[in-house]
Amino acid sequence: MSESNRPKWSGSLGFVLAAAGSAVGLGNIWKFPYITGMNGGGAFVLVYLACIALVGVPVLLAELYIGKVGQANAVLAYEKVHKEKSFWRLPGALGLISAFLILSFYSVIGGWILNFEWCSLLNEFGTRPEGEIKSMLSDLFEDPTRQIFLHSIFMLLTVGIVLGGVQKGIEKWTKLLMPGLVLILIGLLVYSLFLPGFGQAAEFLFLPDFSKLSWEGLLEAVGHSFFTLSVAVGVMVTFGSYLSKDDNLPRMGFSIAIIDTVLALTAGLVIFTAVFSYGIEVDTGPTLIFQTLPLLFGKMPGGYFIAVTFFLLIASTALTSTISILEVVVAYCTETFKAPRRITTLIVGFAAFAVGLLSDLSTNLLSHVKIVGLNFFDFFDKLTSSLFLPLSGLLTSVFLGWVLGPRAVDEIIRDTGFEAYRKTLLICIRVIVPISVSIILIMGLDWLWPA
Ligand code: PFF
């Protein structure tokens, strides 16, 4: 596709909302609260904020820059910036594979959320006995037909939006969904203010107790800073390639990171307020929003509406993320195979759905199939989050910081009003990101050799 007929954002707002829509997702409303709960609260939050600032944002800016200068898909952009066919396509290729795999299992979780939205609408949390509410997730896991049906609906929604294209699909829908989900979150926050556990939740999240911080928590915070900002998966390169030459990268990058972080903290506050108000353990882990919260919704005044809006919120955030992931692969295939965009969207969507079936079945019919001791779902998750994402992020930082060198950092910063940030960005991209990500890469590989 020639540069002149590549899609373009209608303006900076459209871009920032679409990129923030990608960043804000299950990582903010599901994963951030539960890993914070498991890692003791405030001290982990501080480390997480530091990781966003020193690791996530620099890689985010590097990717936007590579996309904007390369004006091509997530793989080709690296090559075009380097001006020769090279090894440096590797971070883009790793990102592309990760995007496809993440899309396959993220849309499965999208299906679980539709299930809980449906149960909320039927008021099942308010009417069913506690034991049944607790086992709703495991019941779903044991029912492949239901899981596949809901998964397919979620994928159809994703494909339907991406079929519309960049401006009329992704941009139009994120402009609608993002303000909607911010409003829902504000509504839930206001409700939380009236619950007795609000003060305790704020203390848990914002008063650091360093004795609770562990080495694993530190590693988790670095890894999560990539996932939550949607970096190292080609999204920001692809979205950056739809920007114009004079767009202000630091301003856009900071806006995305701030929106993502504020929404994660707000979601944490809402969820922990509910948890503390009803005397539940904070460290229940991944089942926090699928078991603990539904139990609480059943007991809260107005719990019916809270449950319906809460799961609607998560479904919307998941959808604005899956559309961005699908776009990465669609942009790559359209440009590489010179294929019509609509047909490519349908084929890629279907292929990701087909691979996702392995995740649907990994809790039932295929639960006995293990790769390095993990079922398909856990394997795809681990492979991307512990290997491909860190490796792609690490290579991108080395590419920008050492191969392209300080000139690239100058170009990111020049005439943007953020000149004072130049030195910090250079240090982060050349030293802090490579060292910290290499450590998590090495430390995080033990799963490949199960005992
Ligand atoms: N950033 C999303 C979240 O926090 O849920 C996850 C995500 C979206 C990862 C898009 C990767 C991606 F390409």
Image: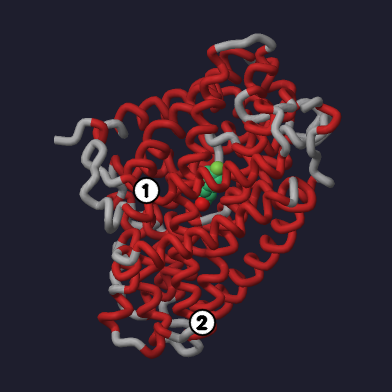
Vertical relation: 343 (above or below) 314: above
Q: Which residue is mark 1?
A: 358
Q: Which residue is mark 2?
A: 121
Q: Which part of the image, by quadrant, shows the C terminus? A: top left
Is residue 59 among the parts visible in the rendering? Answer: yes
Q: Residue at x 43, y 31 (%)?
A: 388
Q: Secondary structure at mark 1?
A: helix
Residue 403 horizontal side relative to residue 150, left or right: right
Residue 189 horizontal side relative to residue 419, left or right: left
Of residues 97 and 19, which is closer to you in this image?
97
Q: Secondary structure at mark 2?
A: helix
Residue 198 horizontal side relative to residue 397, left or right: left
How many marks can you see? 2
Vertical relation: 375 (above or below) 109: above
Q: Position of residue 46 (x, y in %)?
A: 45, 49
Quadrant position of residue 293: bottom left
Q: Which part of the image, by quadrant, shows the N terminus? A: top right
Q: Which mark is residue 341?
A: none
Is residue 206 among the parts visible in the rendering? Answer: no
What's the residue type where badge 1 is placed?
A: Leu
N-terminal label among 2 and 1: 2
Vertical relation: 114 (above or below) 358: below
Circle 1 crowding by C-alpha within 10 Å: few under 14, some 14–19, many from 20: many
Of residues 388 and 340, which is closer to you in this image?
340
